[in-house]
Image (cartoon, rainbow, N blue to C red):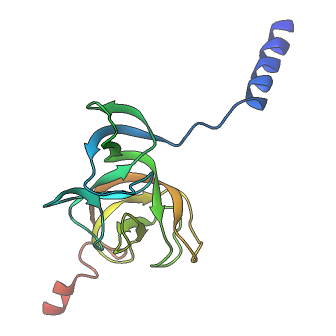
Amino acid sequence: ILAVILFTSFLYAGSVFAQNPPSLGGIAVNIKISEENVGEGDIISITKDGFKKSTASYDPQTYGVVVAAPILSVELRNDSTRAVVSGGEVQVKVSAANGEIKVGDFIATSEEAGVGVKAPTAGYTLGKALQDYTDTSRSGLISVLVDVGYFSGPLGVGALSPLNKLI
């Protein structure tokens, strides 16, 4: 019984003094970003000029998200590189420009540099929201399960595709 009390006391004491670590990302690749002012949560795309913040809606060239503290980094990190994760749970900059984001919504890139939005229609997406985001006044960070791919829309494959008008 004494051992259980001591163990329980140790766990309680540990949680009282615990500090919150920075948001952890998955396995990252340290890459050179071809622009300034890139920070945690920025969505990165591959362009003809190198890696940059995404600036197109539903960008098919989406690569990943800048993270502050990846679990593991591939390649050496230096002052000119950033850790970028292309799969796993990370903090992503989002806005409610396409409507409030709810858990499970697909997140797409937007025309706002490096910022994701709710994906109400079919297209290339970054992943799925793991948290709600409702602040319409500014962008913020939420947890997203990054899995870059094609989202077929809320009603199924091609339901909202412009090609349906041709059929």
Furthest-top residue in view? Answer: 2
Report the quarter where the N terminus lies.
top right
Report the quarter where the C terminus lies.
bottom left
Check the image and report above or below for 65 versus 29.
below
Position of residue 20 measured from the top left corner of the image (x, y, whole percent): 64, 38
Please report the residue visible at 25 percent of the width from the left and 68 percent of the height from the top: 59
Check the image and report above or below for 140 versus 33.
below
Position of residue 54 measured from the top left corner of the image (x, y, whole percent): 30, 64
Position of residue 52 measured from the top left corner of the image (x, y, whole percent): 27, 59
Count the marks. 0
Work out whether residue 60 or residue 128 is closer to the camera in this orientation and state it: 60
Left or right: residue 113 compared with residue 19: left
Please report the residue visible at 70 percent of the width from the left and 30 percent of the height from the top: 18
Work out whether residue 77 or residue 124 is closer to the camera in this orientation and state it: 77
Check the image and report above or below for 15 versus 82.
above
Position of residue 36 measured from the top left corner of the image (x, y, whole percent): 34, 57
Q: Image quadrant of residue 92?
A: bottom left
Left or right: residue 148 compared with residue 12: left
Please report the residue visible at 52 percent of the width from the left and 43 percent of the height from the top: 23
Work out whether residue 157 or residue 11 is closer to the camera in this orientation and state it: 11
